[in-house]
Amino acid sequence: MKEFRYVITDPEGIHARPAGELVKTAKAFSSSIKLSKDKTEADCKKIFGIMGLAVKQGNEIILTFDGEDEEAAYEAVSRFMKENM
């Protein structure tokens, strides 16, 4: 299992457009990818779960990756977060 910690820099936090793109990125992998904020967790392959976390600018999130392609998933999702969030 791999873990990626990130502080959101986007002034709007994780809103609908980037949440949809995050889901699209996560669905490309078979690994389980979870996003958590303040001990609440959501499946990165489900947009309503991500939106339900109400992640704002300055919040620290933790992404966890577990599965056969976790390394590739980690690289793709962490790159997405750094470029878009």
Image (cartoon, rainbow, N blue to C red):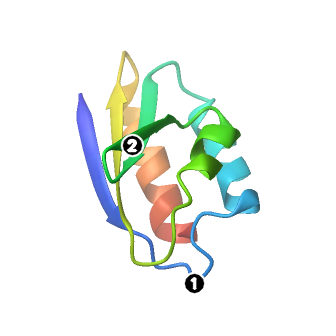
Q: Height in image: 67 above or below 25?
A: above
The secondary element bearing badge 1 is classed as loop
For disc 2, the marked residue is: 40
Question: How many numbered tags mark residues here?
Answer: 2
Q: Nearer the viewer, residue 77 or 57?
A: 57
Side (left or right) of 59 relative to 42: left
Q: Height in image: 39 above or below 15?
A: above
For disc 1, the marked residue is: 11
The secondary element bearing badge 2 is classed as strand
Instruction: Specify the quadrant that holds the N terminus.
Output: top left
Q: Say which residue appears at 76% left-offset and 60% top-offset.
A: 17
Percent x, y for residue 58?
40, 77
Which amino acid, mark 2?
A: Thr
Q: Say which residue appears at 53% left-offset and 69% top-offset.
A: 83
Percent x, y for residue 36?
38, 45
Q: Height in image: 53 above or below 66?
A: below
Q: Earlier in the sequence, mark 2 or mark 1?
A: 1
Side (left or right) of 71 relative to 15: left
Q: Height in image: 70 above or below 3?
A: above
Q: Nearer the viewer, residue 21 or 28?
A: 21
Separation (CA) of disc 2 from disc 1? 21 Å
Q: Tell me whether circle 2 and circle 1 mark residues in contact (CB < 8 Å).
A: no
Percent x, y for residue 62?
32, 50
Q: Nearer the viewer, mark 2 or mark 1?
A: 2
Q: Say which residue appears at 25% left-offset and 36% top-offset.
A: 2
Q: Nearer the viewer, residue 71 or 40?
A: 40
Q: Tag 2: Cα neighbours inside 10 Å, few (<14), some, or many (≥20)? A: few
Q: Say which residue appears at 33% left-offset and 37% top-offset.
A: 64
Side (left or right) of 19 relative to 3: right
Which amino acid, mark 1?
A: Pro
